[in-house]
Amino acid sequence: MDLTTVMTTDDPAVGLRAVGALHRLAEQVEAAHVALARKQGWSWEQIGDALRVSRQSVHAKYGK
C-alpha cells in the first residue's frame, strides 16, 4: 500500500498499522545512529541534544 492510500483511507486500522511501522523504523534508525555517534566518541549529552532529549533519558535507553 502506498503513502497516498494510507493518508486518504477511511480505515483506522490501515492508518494505525502505518503509524506503528513508522515508529518501529524510527526506533531502528535512532538506535543505529546513537551507536554510530558513541563509536565516534560523542557524549551522551551531545546525543541527547541532537535528539532534543536529556542525556539521562538517552543514556537510560541506549547505555547498556
Image (cartoon, rainbow, N blue to C red):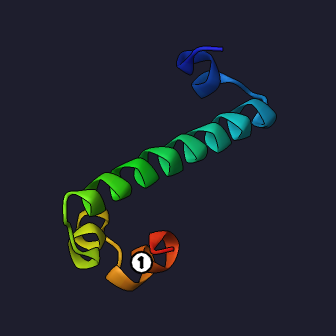
Q: Where is residue 13 in the image (x, y as percent from the top left)?
A: 80, 35
Q: Report the side of 7 relative to 35 (left or right).
A: right
- Does residue 24 sit above or below 13 in this rendering? below
Q: Report the side of 44 relative to 46 (left or right).
A: right
User: Which image quadrant for residue 34?
Assistant: bottom left
Q: Report the side of 35 relative to 19 (left or right).
A: left
Q: Which amino acid does label 1 sit on?
A: His
Q: Position of residue 5 (x, y in %)?
A: 62, 17
Report the front residue among 51 and 32.
32
Q: Report the side of 31 relative to 40 (left or right).
A: right
Q: Position of residue 32 (x, y in %)?
A: 41, 48
Q: Name the residue under label 1.
A: 59
Furthest-bottom residue in this view = 56
Quadrant where the image shows the N terminus: top right
**Residue at point 23%, 71% (across, down):** 49
**Residue at point 77%, 37% (across, down):** 12
**Residue at point 29%, 76% (across, down):** 44
**Residue at point 27%, 58% (across, down):** 39
Report the front residue among 51 and 6.
51
Report the front residue among 20 and 46.
46
